[in-house]
């Protein structure tokens, strides 16, 4: 489960179906698992993945590292690459630009004039039987909503129109790679998580 660890950072490969952070309930979450793995009291997620999504999650082990990483992500100095198995006929390569409106538990594609709408951009590229996705913006449920909107819902994502189901609480979306600059050493760092077994083989 541990992808990378040093005095400042911990990167874990999150299984699909568990939360990234505590929710005030008894549900299992990756942050508490991480604290248990490395025997620490301070550990905070720099970014989150939706519960049904798997892949790289980066945690800061110090407040200084957390502050620097959050600022770098706000300034788009990191690069997140996802893989997804989708239905429909995805484009070979395209940049998707939409406006999204966040609801209580779901995001909807709307017009730019809609009050509260936020611009969302991602690049998609077909790689074998999967879709490679590079996030430009980081909106709530962005990948799931934008792919559904073009008629290519993620397999297992019933909330966003998939007619194919996987095991409960799991969808075929995986955060495979995170490129960033180390917050203390200031050197390039690449974190990668292998595809989980629940992904369709073709």
Image (cartoon, rainbow, N blue to C red):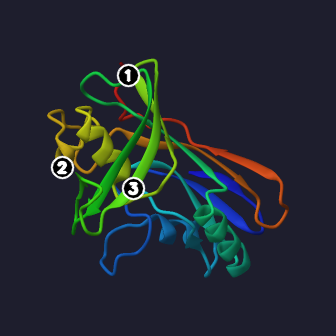
Compared to 145, does 125 lie above or below? above
Q: Nearer the viewer, residue 56 or 18?
A: 56
Image coordinates of residue 85 in percent, x first then y, are 35, 31
Looking at the picture, does residue 187 appear above or below residue 31?
above
Q: Quadrant of residue 94?
A: top left
Whether residues under marks 1 and 2 lie with C-beta atoms below 8 angstroms apart, the answer is no
Report if residue 52 is visible in the image. no
Relative horizontal placement of residue 21, taking residue 67 as reference (left or right): left
Identify the residue under disc 3.
Answer: 119
- Number of numbered labels in the structure image: 3
Mark 1 crowdedness (10 Å alpha carbons): few <14, some 14-19, many ≥20:
few
Calculate the distance from the C-alpha at mark 3 to the C-alpha at mark 1: 33 Å
Badge 3: how crowded within 10 Å, few (<14), some, or many (20+)? some
Q: CA distance from mark 2 to mark 3?
A: 21 Å
Q: Nearer the viewer, mark 1 or mark 2?
A: 2
Distance of mark 1 from mark 2, alpha carbons? 22 Å
Would you name the residue on which mark 2 appears?
A: 159
Give the quadrant of the C terminus. top left
Left or right of 58 on screen, residue 32: left
Q: Earlier in the sequence, mark 2 or mark 3?
A: 3
Within 10 angstroms of label 2, few (less than 14), some, or many (20 or more) residues? some
Q: Residues at badges 2 and 3 in contact (C-beta under 8 Å)?
A: no
Residue 73: x and y in percent read 61, 62
Residue 120, horizontal then vertical, whole percent? 40, 52
Residue 201 numbered mark, or none:
1
Q: Earlier in the sequence, mark 1 or mark 2?
A: 2
| Residue situated in front as seen by the camera: 194 or 83 | 83
Please identify, in this view, whether the residue under mark 2 or under mark 3 is nearer the observer.
3
Q: Nearer the viewer, mark 3 or mark 1?
A: 3
Q: Residue at x 32, y 53 (%)?
A: 99
User: Could you tell me residue 109's position as x and y percent?
Assistant: 25, 51
């Amino acid at each position: 489960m541990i992808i990378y660890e040093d005095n400042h950072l911990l990167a874990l490969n999150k299984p699909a179906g568990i939360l990234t952070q505590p929710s005030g309930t008894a549900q299992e979450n990756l942050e508490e698992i991480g604290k248990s793995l490395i025997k620490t009291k301070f550990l905070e997620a720099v970014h989150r993945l939706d519960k049904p999504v798997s892949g790289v999650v980066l945690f800061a082990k110090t407040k200084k590292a957390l502050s620097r990483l959050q600022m770098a992500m706000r300034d788009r100095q990191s690069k997140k690459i996802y893989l997804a198995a989708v239905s429909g006929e995805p484009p070979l390569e395209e940049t998707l630009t939409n406006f999204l409106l966040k609801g209580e538990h779901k995001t909807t594609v709307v017009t730019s004039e809609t009050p509260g709408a936020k611009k969302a951009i991602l690049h998609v590229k077909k790689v074998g039987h999967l879709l490679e996705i590079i996030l430009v913006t980081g909106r709530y449920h962005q990948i799931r909503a934008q792919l559904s909107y073009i008629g290519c819902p993620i397999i297992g994502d019933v909330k966003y129109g998939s007619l194919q189901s996987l095991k409960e609480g799991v969808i075929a979306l995986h955060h495979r790679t995170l490129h960033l600059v180390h917050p203390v050493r200031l050197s390039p760092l690449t974190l990668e998580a292998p595809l989980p077994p629940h992904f369709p083989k073709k």
